[in-house]
Every structure is written in structure tokens, then in C-alpha cells.
Image (spheres, rainbow, N blue to C red):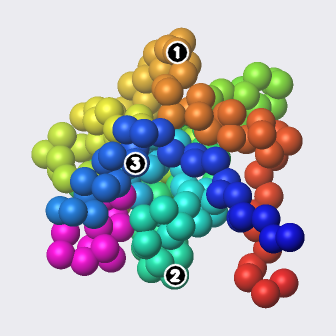
Amino acid sequence: MSHPETRPASRFSPKLKETITSLLGRYETKRSSILPILHAVQDERDWISPEDVQELERDFGLSVVDVTEVLTFYTMYRKSPPKPYRLEVCGSISCWLLGSDDTLRAAAEKIAAAQAEGRPLPFEVHRVECLGVCGYAPVALVNKDRYLNVTPAEALRLMDDYAKRPLPEAAKVAAADLAARGGKYEPPAPVGQ
């Protein structure tokens, strides 16, 4: 007796599914919709897991190969569970000339010192390319919030401020996802292994 194949439960909220369907209808080809769809998934889930990519193929007909190509090409997409807050500091020429390396270093040192003291901060810090506001360098983002003229002292103040805030909803989703994985993220083995 054959049993019908059971579909895994959806990882996406009804609102996200509606957004994806809308985005698919907005573009001439499905492939053209991948970037905004990945943004929508990451906005809800805080990162894009291999299971999310599989669901995009299964439920929306987006090729795993096409989605993975985009996902691995662009650094703006997170492929592993992030910390709740991502401090991104522009490292392009205007920001660099006005001290973005010092801002990055101060933030990284704060994170390292807290980790050494056994009190990890809910931050990761990254150097990114131009954030498009060169006249107000150095520029930084905390998640999607933009800050201008960010000195090392201002970066540390921002970190203190964000550390006191409630976690973003997407970070809660990512934490639940990580807990469901037993507290650690293990990337899947490459296909065929």
C-alpha cells in the first residue's frame, strides 16, 4: 500500500507567502524576482537556510540552482544564523579616509572584550562597500537603520543602545530555528555525499 507523500510544514508565514507570490507576479521571469524574494525571506527569518531555498523551489518553482547562485554571489544575504544585530560599516574611500577602519576596530574590540569576559554581545560587525551617503562619512547600518558620521565613540554608543532594546522579531525566528537544530548550525553536506 502506498502512502501519499507528506509535505514538510511551511517555514514561511502567510504574509511572507503572499509577498513572494506578489513579487513573482511583478517580474517577467521567476528568476528576475529572486533578489527581492531573498530580501523578504531574510527580513522575516533573519537568514536564509538551505531549507528555505528548498521551500522556494517546492512551493514557488524557483530553481535551487538559480537561488543558490544569487545567495552565494551577494554578501548581503546571510547563509547562517546571525547575531540579532549586524553592525555594518562602510569601508569605501570616503568612509575609509574619515576613519571607518577605526570605527570597525572599536566595535570589534568591544565584542572581543565582552566575549572574553563571558558576556557575549548580540552583535556582529562587518566592513561593507559603499552605503551611498559619502557626504556623511563614515556611514554605518545597524540591521537596516542607517547612521551618519559614525565615529568609534558613536559606534560604541549605538551598540550600547541596541543591546538594551528588545530583540527584533526576525532574530527571535532565527533563535527558534537554531534551537530546533539543537543549538548549533551545521551546514548540509554537498549534494551527492
Residue type, numbered disc 2: Val
First in sequence, mark 3 or 1: give its number.
Answer: 3
3D distance between C-alphas at marks 3 and 1: 26 Å
Instruction: Please name whichever residue, 128 or 179, is drawn nearer the observer in this view of the structure.
Output: 179
The residue stretch that appears in magenta: 27-37
Residue topped by disc 3 = 17
Q: Would residue 88 appear left or right of 21 to someone viewing this image?
A: right
Residue under the image location 65 percent in, 27 percent down: 121
Q: Callout 2 environment at 10 Å: few (<14), some (14 to 19), or many (20+)?
A: few
Residue under the image location 71 percent in, 64 percent down: 5
Helix or strand or loop: what does disc 3 sit on?
helix
Judge depth for marks 3 and 1 and give the one in front.
3
Residue type, numbered disc 1: Pro
Residue under the image location 54 percent in, 22 percent down: 167
Instruction: Please name whichever residue, 123 or 99, is drawn nearer the observer in this view of the structure.
Output: 123
- Residue 92, percent across and down? 31, 60
Farthest residue to the front: give it. 1
- Quadrant position of the C terminus in the picture: bottom right
3D distance between C-alphas at marks 1 and 2: 36 Å
Q: Is residue 93 above or below residue 1?
A: above
3D distance between C-alphas at marks 3 and 2: 20 Å
Q: Would residue 33 appear left or right of 9 to someone viewing this image?
A: left
Q: Main secondary structure of the magenta part?
A: helix
Residue 44 can be seen in this image: yes
First in sequence, mark 1 or 2: give its number.
Answer: 2
Residue topped by disc 1 = 166
Q: How many marks?
A: 3
Q: Would residue 154 appear left or right of 137 to someone viewing this image?
A: right
Residue topped by disc 2 = 65
